Image (tube, rainbow, N blue to C red):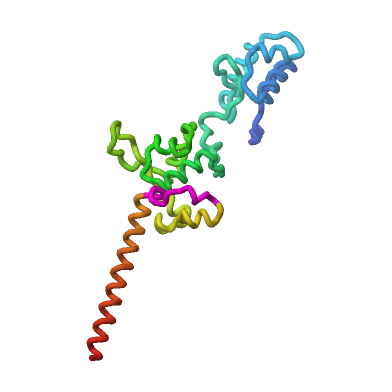
Amino acid sequence: MIKKKIKKKNNIIEFPSKLSSVEKEIEAIVFAAAEPLDIETISNKISKKIDVEKVLMKLQTEYSSRGINLVCISKKWSFRTSPHLSKLMIQEKTVEKKLSKAAIETLAIIVYHQPVTRAEIEEIRGVAFGTNTLEILMELNWVKPGGRKDVPGRPIQYKTTDDFLSHFNLQKLSDLPTVDELGAAGLIDSTNIDNAVFGTGKFYKEKQEEKKENIYSNIDEMLSSTLDTEDKK
């Protein structure tokens, strides 16, 4: 009994075979291109005249079952990862971007004047909103809508979130530097600022609560000292 030898195929990917030199040129041109190419562009780059579209169709068939496919979109050709393998190509990467000057100014205004409307922010800044300035702050979840102002048109008001406090390591809004502190640090000119209108509703509410606590603690101390004096008598 004669035994036939079985040839084992290796696992090496075999690229399209039996290509002429000009067909290889077309393959290389499309592969190396930074962007999809139309037939005219490819024709101008090869060494001799040939039916470029016919060659591209041949290559498209050859690559149809491989990890990369030759595709034609809007009459332009390019190599793309096979749709079945697209998940393998996904790479998540964190990109740090600095806030624009407009976004920083807008955030500062909302922080110290909240709740505040878009029109009020523009009035304080002296310029109209840029593209996506407020949206960027909302995407970071540092700012959110805070109801509507009770005026004609009922515009949306904006305020800071708990994520804002967490990011800047603040327990509450009253931990923010005051007008005097900002002035002392040389960050603002506090001589022309009215303290009565500088700041947030929440900020002053917290300050008022602190004052009440101080008053109550003073009353407790006064009562305690009075009782001690009466006991000694």
Q: Is residue 198 magenta?
A: yes
Q: Is residue 86 left or right of residue 123?
A: right
Quick check: can you spot residue 194?
yes
Can you say whether 198 is above or below 85 in the image? below
Most foreground residue, 150 or 148: 150
Residue ID at (57%, 29%): 81
Q: Count the marks.
A: 0
Q: Is residue 112 left or right of residue 100?
A: left
Most foreground residue, 214 or 35: 214
Q: Quadrant of the N terminus?
A: top right
Which residue is outermost to the bottom? 233
Q: Is residue 115 left or right of residue 58?
A: left
Quick check: can you spot residue 2?
no
Where is residue 231, by image quadrant? bottom left
x then y, percent, for residue 13: 64, 32
Q: Is residue 173 magenta?
A: no
Which residue is outermost to the right? 47
x then y, percent, for residue 152: 28, 32
Q: Main secondary structure of the magenta part?
A: loop
Residue ID at (59%, 28%): 68
Most foreground residue, 115 or 146: 115
x then y, percent, for residue 154: 29, 34
Where is residue 173, by image quadrant? bottom left
Q: Which residues are magenta?
A: 187-200
x then y, percent, for residue 107: 46, 44
Most foreground residue, 159 or 58: 159
Q: Quadrant of the C terminus?
A: bottom left
Where is residue 100, by image quadrant? top right
Residue ID at (31%, 66%): 213
